[in-house]
Structures are given as structure tokens and as C-alpha cells.
Image: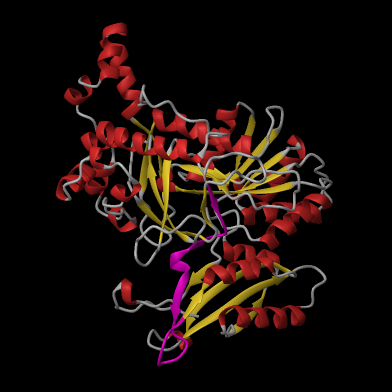
Amino acid sequence: MKSLHNPTPDWNNSPPEIWQRWQLNRLRDYLSHRVIPFSAHYRRLFEEHGIHPNDIRTLRDWGRVPFSSKKDLTVPREQQREFVLTPDEATLRREPAMWMTALLHGKKAAKEQAEAEFRPLLLTSTTGRSSDPVPFLYTKHDLKNLDITGARLMYAGRSQRDFRHINLFPYAPHLAFWQAHHAGLGFGTFMLSTGGGKTLGTEGNLNLIDKIQPDILIGMPTFIYHVMLEAQSLGKHWPNLKRLVLGGEKVAEGLRARLRDLAAALGSPGAHVMATYGFTEAKMAFPECVGDDPETNASGYHLSPDLGLVELIDPKTGEPVSEGCPGEIVFTPLDARGTVVLRYRTGDIAEGGLTWAKCPSCGRTCPRLLGPISRVSEVRELHLDKLKGTLVNFNLLEHLLDDQKGIAAWQIELRKRHDDPHDTDEVHLHLTAESGVREADLKLAVSRRFHEATEITPNALHFHTLAELREQLGVGRLIKEEKLVDHRPKTSAPASQVALSS
């Protein structure tokens, strides 16, 4: 559905005032003609709160619409269906685009048009770490949008159609794999998907990369690091690497630097490391851009304002924050079909805020999220003694460990002392030292930095071989590696009252 009187601004260079006015117009159209008529959940919600799409003239008006969150989606399957746009034939017949197609091309063509817009063809799901996986349905209309956002990843990364791309994301009903796949389709370039480590294993991926000699590797940060480290140890020569495109996990500066060093050791100095940010509920990912300097990554994540409206709010109050201030990311699609959630609270914090300023790297004027991106849920209350809890930001710890020189791999494990559910919490840190680094020196450095960042010290540090720790992490086996694991005995307390601890 495109408004004939509201042409879409240019993703590359339309000014903020044009975009902001356009988004509000598009939002009203989308709600009036697609969401409210065809979403049982939001039709009921808007009626209960006395809200009509035409009442939404400003973002303050839009703020009257209640947030959606993961808990709204972790419901029985029958209720999940209420988030799927399900049109009735009578309403569709009254749509101008439909009766015009029927008039000009016949009823069969109109039926095919409706099916392309609304019939589900693909299912992805959340990874289910904090709750049961939640399915998200895509129609042919959504897949076209996935082509658009995929092509934008390519444009932002300054890819070329004659480049060879290898997608190392695991085969799974997971956005990261399908976004990479549609990046190749949307841009019109060579894209080989290996299925990651679980499908071919490390050796199979190494052999394929040897044969293809790609320009761009795409995948999970930890798996790409694992593959490149293994390639270096085997004396491989990959001289064509220009980009390492990462998704599915946070990417710290220390990891970026190690990946650039590995690319240089494999014969590709000057390779750029480019992160993406996406989540299942958005049905799209947002790219950093690639500038001239491979060691500069200040561009932020370039949004698609024609396909989604992003707000930043204070995670405690729910109130909007000022431009450039940290806030929780709230997402509303503007052109999705299939499963649709409005004002969805992601639980992700954009530490650098949202900006409409021109990108200093590529010059695009689309809005950008400035990182790092952290999780609200990773600020946890840890019971280190019997008297009180201590708030620990595990986002900081993850970046600290990724940035620490000398660490090849790591995992944080949460335990209860003596495995007693009522005793105090413990933090155990599992490490692999890089070649040539003394474990005693690394233990001292990590313990000191750990304490500086959190004012606590790990209860124990355990050193492993790289193969052992990779197995613990699930590298190549799991969709997302388990960098923070909770092995404490469960108590009978409600989930909202259970404090995660170190």
C-alpha cells in the first residue's frame, strides 16, 4: 500500500523535516487501511483506548497508543494469531487498489494481488533465550521489503555486484540468515550460504572459502572470528577480503580490531568490519556504513524510515528522550504484513541516541541509531551477600572482555554457592588466552578490569583450551553463542522476583 498523494522520500538525501512529516502521514494511512481493519489485537486495543488513526497528528499523539512488548507475544497460539493481518474479503473489495485491479485486469488478478500482500509464506522466530520462541510470519509483500533492506545493507557497505559474498549464518528460521540471503537477491549479486558451522563444520566452511575466495564474509561475530583464527593457524591465504559484515551479537571495538588483524594476516590488509543491528519483530536489519578509514566506525546504524518508525524512550518512565540522548528502542512498522506489532519495546538501549544529522561517513540523511546497543535486561541485580543486591551491567562486562587484549574466547557463568538456591550468587569466568599470553598475567589484568567496571571480582577464573571453550559457547552449533549462562538451581519464586547474580 503506497499513498498516491504521499510519495516516498529518498533514503539517501531527503531532509529530516520531509521524513518526519511523511512518516506521520504514512502511519495514519497504514493504521487506517491495514492494521486496524485486519489486526484483531490492535482493533480491540484502539477501541478500548478511544483512539482513531486520524487523531494522530504528532508524535505526542502517537504516544497515547500503549506499548507492545515480548509479554504480549508470549501467549497461546490462538492469541498470537491476533497479531497477524488477516483481511476479510468484503473489506478488501472496498479498497480502491483492489477494485481498480479487478476492473482493469479481472477478478483473478485482484485475488492474486491480495494473496501476494497477505498470504503468509515464511516464518521466522525469536531465539527463545528469555522466553519461548515467538513466530513471525512474512508474506510476499514482506519479502520484497526484505529485498529493499538487504540491498541497503549492500549500499551502506559499498559492495559491488561483481563481489563474491559468503553468508555464514546458520540455516534457521532466524532474521539474520534471511536478511543476508535477501541482501544478495535485492542487490543482485553472488551470495553463497553455507549454513554455518552446524551444517558444514569448520573444515567445510574453510574449504568453501578457499575455493570461492570471497570479497565479503557475513555472519555471527564469534563464528567469523573462529573461522578466521582457524584459517590463520592453517596458513590460509584469503587476499580478496574487503568486508566482514557482522550480525546477531554486539560487536566491541576490541573484537573489530582482532578481526582486522586476522584479515591482514590472511592477506587482506585494510578490510572493513561492519556491524548490523536487527531484531525479529522489525523484520529487517539496519547497517553501519563503510567509510574510507577501516578503523573508524562512528556512523551508527542507518534506519529505513520508509519502512519503520523508531522512537527512543526512557526505559523507566516510558517518556520520549531528546535527540542524541540514550534511550530504549521502540519500533513500529510502516509497511509490514503478516505478523505486526506496534510501538514494540525492544529492551535494547541505543547508548548514543537517535540522530537525524547527516552521516559524517557516507553523507546519507536517513535517521541513525548511535551505539553501542545494550540490553536493559543485562543490568542485573546480583546477590553477593545475604543483605543486599548489587546492580551489575553485563553489557559493560561483555565489551570489557571483548576489548581485553590477550583473550581469545570467554564465557561468564552464574552459579549459587554450593548449588544451594538460598545461598549467595557467584560469578565464574571461563577464559582462553591468546597464543603467547601467560595465563597468570591475563588473570591479573582481567580481575583488575572486572573490579574497576563493576566493583566486584569474579569468584573464580577457569582457563580452557580454545576447542573446549568453543564447545561450551556453542560456536557453530547454536544460533547465538552462550556468552552469559545461568547454572543456578531454580527457586519457586516468581520470575519477576528472581535476581540474577554474580
Q: Is residue 489 above or below residue 99?
A: below
Q: Please state the extent of the stretch shown in magenta in the rendering.
A: 368-390
Which quadrant holds residue 424?
bottom left
In front: 155, or 199? 155
Residue 282, how many percent across, how many down? 42, 45
In front: 459, or 67? 67
Residue 84, how many percent across, how many down? 28, 39
Q: On the rendered structure, is 372 left or right of 128?
A: right
Q: Residue furthest front?
A: 17
Question: Residue at the location (50% across, 80% down)?
Answer: 502
Q: Quadrant of the N terminus?
A: top left
Question: Residue at the location (57% across, 85% down)?
Answer: 459
Q: Is residue 337 visible?
A: no
Question: Residue at the location (20% across, 42% down)?
Answer: 43
Q: Is residue 235 above or below residue 171?
A: below
Q: Is residue 388 visible?
A: yes
Q: Is residue 381 magenta?
A: yes
Q: On the rendered structure, is 179 left or right of 449?
A: left
